[in-house]
Amino acid sequence: MRKSLVFAGVLAAGGLAMIAGKPMAQDATRSVWDGVYTEAQAQRGQAAYAQSCGLCHGVGLTGLGEAKPLTGPEFLSNWNGLTMADLFDRTRTTMPLNKPRSLTKEQYADVLAYLLKFDGFPAGQSELPARSEMLAGVTIDAFKPSAALSVTGASADAAAIVADPNGAPNAYAADPGFFKLPAGRTMGSTSAVATDSRGHIWIAERCGANNCAGSKLDPILEFDANGGFIKAFGAGMLLFPHGLFVDAKDHIWLTDGHSDGTKGAQVFEFDTTGKLLRTLGKAGVSAEGPDTFTEPNAVLVTKDGTIFVADGHTPNKGAARIVKFDKSGKFLKQWGGHGAGPGQLEVPHTLAMDSKGRLFVGDRWNNRIQVFDQEGKLLATWDQFGRPSGMFIDRSDVLYVADSESRNPEGYGHHPGWARGIRIGSAKTGAVTAFIRDTEPNPDKAATSGAEGVWADRHGVIYGAQVQQKTVVRYTRAH
Ligand code: HEC
């Protein structure tokens, strides 16, 4: 289907094939970092986008259902290394899906200028041209190339503060093939793994792909303690399973981070038979309200039933908040708000709670964990565990933090000197004692890799749920 077409296009247009297949009118000497559009153009593009693209791709460009995100890691890694001509031609000949070529060439160029601006590429003095031959000279470099030079300086500074952010020893052995899926079924992207009191492992994956929209597959999977498949459920209910939590009653809580007008942007509570017990939020309504969510990332339920939801997956847009509900689901309060100041949040991606009832919030875009009391009072800010995509705290207050995004160059995931992987330490003292490094050989070229979701069972066995590699890896202590 379309997906494979896109993929083939990416391959064909990349590298050598591009030289063979394109009129090389110009060498690709400039990149999207060189100020290749103007502010005024991006503003025109924003209006054109709202009119012709927003309906399907969403106001925040984050994609809706089958319409892919036009911002963020998935989009940037799709197009990284290609040229603006590739993006221009692809967009003009196939978009809007229902009416390709219905805009003028200039309008397509304007919309692309808006996408560039939205993704944080700088504006400049001259407009993005509306001709492929000229656009072929502009490469899409998701990550600022020259920034690599400044890394030494930055990490030298960092080194003064943290001895070596990647220096903790790894005492774990990885088993990537632990889970046996039913015949014909493959694991999709996943950021969601948790274990229950019987040692069963629950995984919510994105229907063999990175999205469940239109799929008939069951995304919520239960495995026994040996990795044997037990059952699956949830077909047709979810678009983008994101955050999973198993509470003290063994209820399975799951957030759906996307919405398409009819479903999504909700939090679900199931029992272990797969029966839906309740939902929070309104199906398909993405909004910041007391009974609606924009993009719920994570849910956590305390022993007394209080519910916390971390809402907002897009930097500087939509929500960036922690929402607190009582055990009946009644809205109590919210806190956060966009920003990098104390108590502010930018992409609160994950939640965990220690034995004292302190709420740990993975403030991912800010490369830090903020620790709050349950009323939202800020108690501590920690950056020694990396850029947090996933977190878990076990009964002994061991803190597990998955970093799937840290990168050296400027741009998405900027966090120079920090390697990706799972850092393990103390939720009491904040000391990092172990580090399981991610295996991606070139993380600076990939917006995400390694575990995004992390959980540990009562024996200290760790599970890491991976979006990019589409797998859940099991880690046991080597001895
Ligand atoms: C009627 C719905 C709809 C409209 C309107 C629409 N799109 Fe799309 N778009 C889609 C769908 C569905 C896909 C994924 C299928 C595909 O790749 O063709 C997609 C894919 C894309 C992609 C490829 C993304 C990637 O990373 O591979 C781009 C770029 C894109 N759209 C840009 C636009 C722009 C710009 C507009 C407005 C001019 C627009 N689209 C309008 C539905 C739509």
Image (tube, rainbow, N blue to C red):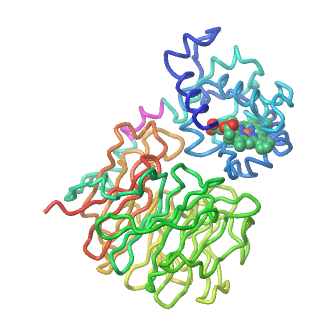
x and y percentages locating residue 447 in the rendered image: 49, 43
Q: Magenta residues: mostly which secondary structure? A: helix
Q: Is residue 400 above or below residue 421?
A: below
- Residue 36 position by quadrant: top right
**Figure quadrant of the C terminus:** bottom left
Q: Is residue 420 visible?
A: yes
Location of residue 456 in the rendering, given as x and y in whole percent from the top left corner: 33, 69
Residue 343 image position (x, y, % from top left): 56, 70
Looking at the image, residue 27 sits to the left or right of residue 439; the answer is: right
The stretch in magenta equals: 146-153
Residue in the image at 67% along x and 86% along y:
330
Q: Is residue 430 left or right of residue 326?
A: left
**Figure check: 261 above or below 361:** above
| Rendering quarter of residue 426 | bottom left
Rendered-image quarter of ligand 1: top right
Task: Look at the image and tell me in which quarter the N terminus lies.
Answer: top right
Is 116 included in the stretch rendered in magenta?
no
Identify which residue is drawn at 68% across, 52% down.
65
